[in-house]
Structure formats: C-alpha cells, structure tokens
Amino acid sequence: MSIQTSEKSSNRGQTFMRTLRQDHAGLSRIMREIDTQAHRLAEDSEGARAILVDAFRYLLRYHHAFHHPREDRLFARIRARDEALDQTLQQLSHEHETGEQETRRLAEDLARASNKELVGECGAELVDRINDYLRHTRTHMRHEETVFYSRAEQVLSDEDWLDIIADDGPDDPITDIRTMRASYPALARSLDEPTSHLGLHRPEHSSSHELRLQMLALTDLYGGLMHEAIDLTRTHFQRLKSVRDPVSLMRTAGTIYADNLRFAGQCVTRPSRWAINTGAGLIVGWLKPYMKQ
C-alpha cells in the first residue's frame, strides 16, 4: 500500500470515528427529548405520544439500522486484533440487539395505547420502561466511548478501516432539519422550538423539571469533554514515545501545546454556551405565565 493510500485510509478512519461520536451527540439530544416527553405523557398524552413515537421511529430507522451496524463492524475488527476485548464487545453487540427490540416494543405500545390508558396505570408503566431504556442506553454509550472508541485508532490497520467503511450508509438525519420535518414532523417541531420560537409556546414545565433537563445536558457535555481529554492524553503519550532526537521533541512539544490550547478553548466555550442557553431557557420559563395574552 502506498503512503498516499495509507494516509487516505487513515483519514477515512478518523472521519468514521468522528461520525460515530457525532451520532452519539445526536442520540444524547434525542434522549433528552424522550426524557422531557415521558414526563409530559400524563398531562398531554396526545402531544407527548406523537413526539415519543417519532423519536423511537427515528432511533429504529437510523441508529439501529445504520449507526449500530457501523459499530458492530468496528467491534468485529477490534475483537480480531485484541482478544482481551472479545467478551466486552460481544456484550455491547448483544445490547444493540436487545436495545432494538425494546425500542420497537416501546414505539408499538405507545402507538397502540389510548389516551385514557396513557394517563393511567398503563402510561405510568410506559414511563418506567422509558426511564429504564434511557438509563441503559446512556450506560451503553459510556461503555462504548471508553472501551473501544479510544482503542480503535490504535489497534486497527489501514486494511481494517477500508473494510469497515465499505458500506457506511447515510448521515444522521438530525443534522438536516428539513429531512427531520419530512420524516418525523412532531419530533422536528419539538426539537426546533427553542431556536425558532425562543421557547415561548413550549408546553409548560416546572422550573425544577427544566433544571433537571439542563443538568442532563451538562452531564453529557462534560462527559464528552472527559472522553476527548482521555483521547488527547493518549495521543500525546504516543507522540512522546516516538520522539528520537531534540528536533522531533521540539516539534512534538509544539504540536502538544497547540492541541492543548484548542482543547482548553473548547473547555471554556462549550460550558459557556450551555450557561447562556440554560439561563435564557429558565428565564423564558419563569416569564411564561406573565406573557400570556
């Protein structure tokens, strides 16, 4: 394999891993929406149900149909290269199967239930199942990111990456609001409301519930930064191991400094954006009762 081909394959591998991480970011956003609507199910069964059904349908059509097969191809290659991870990766693949089954059952049960059932015992049981689903999915994502996302770029060869990305499928539709509106109209409207309407006509939540959702968003944010810090530290270590002379040491130190500076900027800007968005959302929520006509 030529150097040019090798570099192209490595770039594809980096792009592939970046796509998986972006998929997880989108999945976190959808799970926060599911969390919100599950808490609304008893008070607005029809509206919350429509959004939840769209959300689970989106998960089936994209994450279970394309994202998880990508991960499973990655798992298979890592298992072939690193036998110590075999049992862990088998478990993660098994969780993909059981997760898809529960996603389908939740979508079907939500669509089939009457409004009367949703505000009663049946609805309460569905909310419990949804909460369990969210808890297991978040744990599963953390295990994936800590176990194999950081390990993949170390143990896989250029040939591995070429095979893994041979049948990659479409991009996440959440990145295109027009696609979301066409395929998941109720979900798209709810996701788009904070931007297009500044939250002024979102269904009312208590300030404590709104704060809880924002804390989940903050947890996702810092979880992502933590995983990036781990990846960055590992990359720095590999760079330092390859140093052979003072000149390469100076170059490596410069690269490490630049990467650390960029990461430090992200550690400042991402929480700042969260603080601004959270403050604006909470202020609007508190002002809603006084802004009604």
Image (spheres, rainbow, N blue to C red):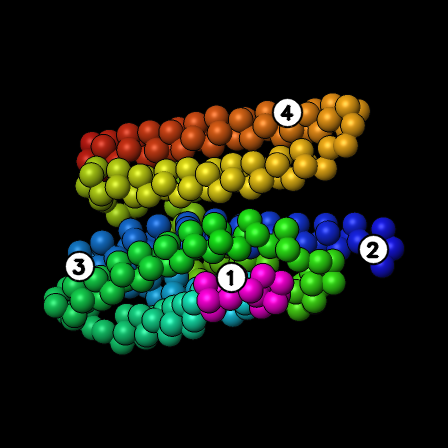
Q: Earlier in the sequence, mark 4 or mark 2?
A: 2
User: Between disc 3 and disc 1, whose residue precedes?
Assistant: 3
Give the Cα separation between the discs numbered 4 and 2. 29 Å
Q: Earlier in the sequence, mark 4 or mark 1?
A: 1
Question: How far across and how far down the image is residue 280, in percent?
Answer: 35, 30
Total numbered labels placed on residues in the image:
4
Magenta stretch, main secondary structure, is helix
Q: Mark 3 or mark 1: which is in front?
A: 1
Tell me which residue sits at (68%, 37%) in the image. 241
Q: Badge 3: few (under 14), some or many (20 or more) residues near its Cα, within 10 Å?
A: many
Dot 1 and dot 2 residues touching (CB under 8 Å): no
Look at mark 3 in the image and give the residue it sits on.
42
- Identify which residue, 263 or 169, lies in the foreground: 263
Q: Quadrant of the N terminus?
A: bottom right
State the SS at label 4. helix
Image: magenta residue range: 76-90
Name the quarter where the C terminus is drawn.
top left
Residue appearing at x 26%, y 48% in the figure: 203
Q: Give the CA separation, mark 4 to mark 1.
A: 33 Å
In front of the other: label 1 or label 2? 1
Query: How far is disc 1 from disc 2 in space, using C-alphas?
Result: 29 Å
Taking depth in this image into account, of 158 and 82 the one nearest to the observer is 82
Identity of the residue drawn at 43% across and 67% down = 91
Residue 89 against residue 234 in the figure, above or below: below
Read off the residue under disc 2.
Answer: 5
Give the labeled residue for mark 4: 257
Question: How far across and how far down the image is residue 204, in percent?
Answer: 23, 44
Q: Nearer the viewer, mark 4 or mark 3?
A: 4
Residue corresponding to mark 1: 85
Question: Do the residues under discs 4 and 3 have CB atoms within 8 angstroms?
Answer: no
